[in-house]
Amino acid sequence: MALNAEVMQAVERLDYRVTVGDVAAQAGLDVKVAQQALLVLASDVQAHLQVSESGEIAYEFPRQFRAILRNKFWRLRLQETWDRVWRILFYLIRISFGILLLVSIALIFITIAILLIAASSADREGGGRRSRSFGGGGFFLPRIWFGPNIFWFFDFDYGRRRYPRRVASSTRTSPKTENQLNFFEAIFSFLFGDGDPNAEREDYRWRSIATVIRNSSGAVVAEQIAPYLDDLGKGWSKDYEDYMLPVLSRFNGQPEVSPEGGLIYHFPELQVSAAERGNRSVSAYLKESLWKFSSASSGQTMLAIGLGSVNLIGALVLGSLLQDSLLVEQLGGLVAFVNSIYWLLLAYGTAFLGTPLIRYFWIQWRNGFIEGRNEQRQQRAIALNQAGDDIREKISYAQQFAAQTVVSKADLAYTTETDLVEQEAAQADKIDAEWRRRLRESNP
């Protein structure tokens, strides 16, 4: 079985001494997956197994276990190296779209300038004959460009008016806020956005559910879990709380029936911890984030639209000028090259403005569904806060199954840290006391 990155992160966050329930709750993992992954990790790094007198198990990992794994497995070293390389490659991909835009604009307008100069020279040599036919189809162009000053877009002081760029530590981190993107990053954000804001929604959902269960000492009712789920079903499926089945399966829970016929659920594995951790804060319901069009500032967005418009208009003008095939053949060089890739330039210019436009309407459509799901979950949280007597009775009955077991080092019956003979010698008094207690119980 391969090493589980989420389990390793959970072990580090929990200070290297954990139980299966600790890891499952911290990472939101299936209890069986967490147990198997812990065994694999413990075997690979030679972690210590600790068993309490009540039979509960804790794992204590060396703090340098990642270094041990790197020295042991070349695949892990290769993966870490690839992660660093990919971050660089992905950043280069992001800025390449802005670079392509500037290159496209430069090629288009340099070619336009060459064609206009060549046309003007031909007009002077040919007595103005060329001006009547240049451009084909009667399309008239002035010899002097009276459009906006395109060099304003290349203001080299632009970078001084923004906050310094912050490079993200990984591709899964949250999007940058306004004024933290440089020009090239802003172009990518304008085109493609900043990724799914709810990419880790499922992980967060299960972590939240596990936290609610642990805050309730391992025993809950369905109404406490409902604000973190999506579809609760309809009719009998909802009344019989079928939506709790995935939760029971993931965290190895057990349903119980109250005297009044209500269902409660307790989770023995989540009731065991390696240390006293107390309650953790958790949101009242699972709230999905709305998709954002772009993290670029409004000024950067307007700049991107302006540059895209200049690029597209320039491509259309260039297409008209390139209709004079005789002039293109005579000039050759850059003009011939641009003519050969003209349709790529036009396609890029069209896609540069078309992609964000389509994405804008798609985001509005997507956010409508997100707002609907958020509202449903919020209503369930409000209903829980305003619970009636029947729900309060179920919660009260669930407390009979609430428990919290801490596997402390003072109550260990066995550990792999020391030899078994040494452990028996160290616990001789405790073993004798236990035998005397059993003798008294057997001979009242």
Image (tube, grey):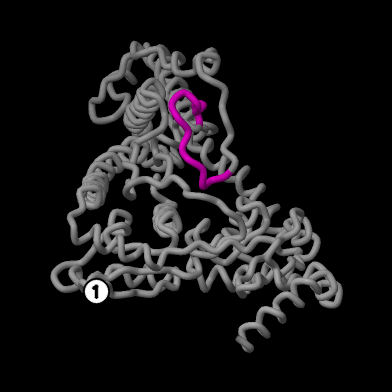
Residue 171 covered by magenta stretch: yes
Residue 347 in which image quadrant: top left
Foreground residue among 331 and 340? 340
Location of residue 325 (image quadrant) = top left
Quadrant housing residue 242:
bottom left
Q: Residue furthest left?
A: 235
On screen, residue 50 above or below 352: below
- Which residue corresponds to mark 1? 259
Name the foreground residue: 265 vs 75.
265
> Quick check: 260 above or below 218?
below
The residue shown at (33%, 38%) is 356
Farthest front residue in view: 444
Q: Position of residue 278 (x, y in %)?
A: 51, 50
- Residue 259: horizontal and vertical position, in percent? 24, 74
Q: In the rendered image, is residue 317 in sight?
A: no
Residue at x-position 45% and y-position 30%: 177
Residue plotted at (41% across, 53% down):
208
Q: Which residue is more in the foreground, 240 or 290?
A: 240
The residue carrying pointer 1 sits among few (fewer than 14), some (14 to 19) or many (20 or more) residues within 10 Å by Cα, namely few
In the displayed structure image, the side of residue 53 where residue 220 appears, left or right = left
Disc 1, SS: loop
- Seen from the viewer's position, the closer of residues 190 and 437 is 437
Q: Amino acid at mark 1?
A: Pro
Which residues fall within the magenta stretch? 170-184
